[in-house]
């Protein structure tokens, strides 16, 4: 049932692009494992071995802290409609902050999402599919607007204050560098 590949085929790219949600897994050698759900049309497959995704402001910033210390990242996609399948992308990621030279080029790939704070650039070295037959069906209704509304209400100054208060350290005290690289 499960298969391993060295790259993202066109068929798997179409599967990825059809998903409304994906999950990100990261950890350092001595941190808690973080698994985060992501949505909001925030992921782009650039080629057979490269994926970027736009990270927006949230209550924590674990992924950023982890990747800066240990670049391992796994992305998980699963079919909630249609034919069953689970797909994992394994690789090495880097954090792209707003002051980094490649921010503008990568940010231009996305529709503007209020509160954008980092882009993760994943070099994929293993693609794995599995059956996904135990995953239930769910119907997509629509995107939630609360995060966008909250971000717009805070404004740029308020978001940077929030980053300073809530997004500088991981749960395990690891730095995210959000203020010095996004200020």
Image (cartoon, rainbow, N blue to C red):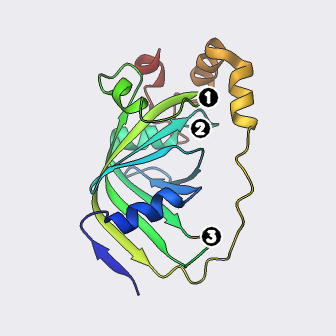
Q: Judge whether residue 33 can be spotted in this image.
A: no
Mark 2: which secondary structure?
loop
Mark carried by residue 80:
3
Which residue does the image show at 51% across and 38% down from the upper left? 55
Whether pointer 1 and pointer 2 mark residues with C-beta atoms closer than 8 Å, the reply is yes
Of 142 and 120, nearer the camera is 142
Q: Position of residue 120 (x, y in %)?
A: 40, 40
**Numbered label attached to residue 1:** none
Q: Distance between the Cα atoms at labels 1 and 2? A: 6 Å
Q: Position of residue 171 (x, y in %)?
A: 56, 41
User: Disc count in the image?
Assistant: 3
Residue name at image x 27 percent, y 55 percent:
49
Task: State if disc 3 and disc 2 touch (CB < 8 Å).
Answer: no
Q: Is residue 147 left or right of residue 67?
A: right
Q: Looking at the rendering, which quadrant does residue 182 occupy?
A: top left
Say which label, 3 or 1, has the lower sequence index.
3
Q: Earlier in the sequence, mark 2 or mark 3?
A: 2
Q: Which residue is mark 1?
A: 166
**Residue drawn at x 44%, y 58% as measured from the top left:** 75
Q: Nearer the viewer, mark 2 or mark 3?
A: 3
User: What element does badge 1 sit on?
Assistant: helix
Above or below residue 159? Residue 91 is below
**Is residue 43 among the parts visible in the rendering?**
yes
Mark before the other along the chain sequence, 1 or 2: 2
Alpha carbons under labels 2 and 3: distance apart: 27 Å
Along the line of sight, the residue nearer the viewer: 60 or 98:
98
Q: Residues within 10 Å of mark 2 (few under 14, many from 20)?
A: some
The residue indicated by pointer 2 is 60
């Amino acid at each position: 049932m499960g298969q391993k590949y060295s790259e993202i085929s066109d068929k798997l790219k179409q599967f990825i692009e059809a998903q409304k949600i994906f999950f990100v897994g990261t950890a350092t050698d001595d941190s808690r494992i973080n698994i985060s759900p992501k949505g909001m049309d925030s992921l782009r497959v650039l080629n057979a071995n490269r994926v970027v995704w736009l990270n927006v402001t949230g209550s924590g910033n674990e992924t950023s802290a982890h990747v800066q210390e240990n670049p391992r990242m796994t992305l998980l996609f699963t079919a909630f409609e249609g034919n069953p399948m689970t797909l994992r992308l394994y690789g090495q990621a880097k954090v792209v902050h707003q002051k980094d030279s490649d921010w503008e080029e990568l940010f231009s790939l996305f529709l503007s999402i209020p509160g954008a704070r980092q882009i993760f650039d994943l070099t994929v070295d293993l693609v794995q599919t599995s059956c996904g037959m135990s995953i239930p069906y769910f119907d997509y209704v629509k995107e939630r607007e609360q995060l966008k509304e909250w971000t717009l209400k805070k404004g740029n100054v308020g978001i940077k204050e929030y980053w300073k208060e809530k997004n500088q350290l991981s749960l395990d005290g690891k730095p995210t560098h959000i203020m010095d690289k996004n200020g």
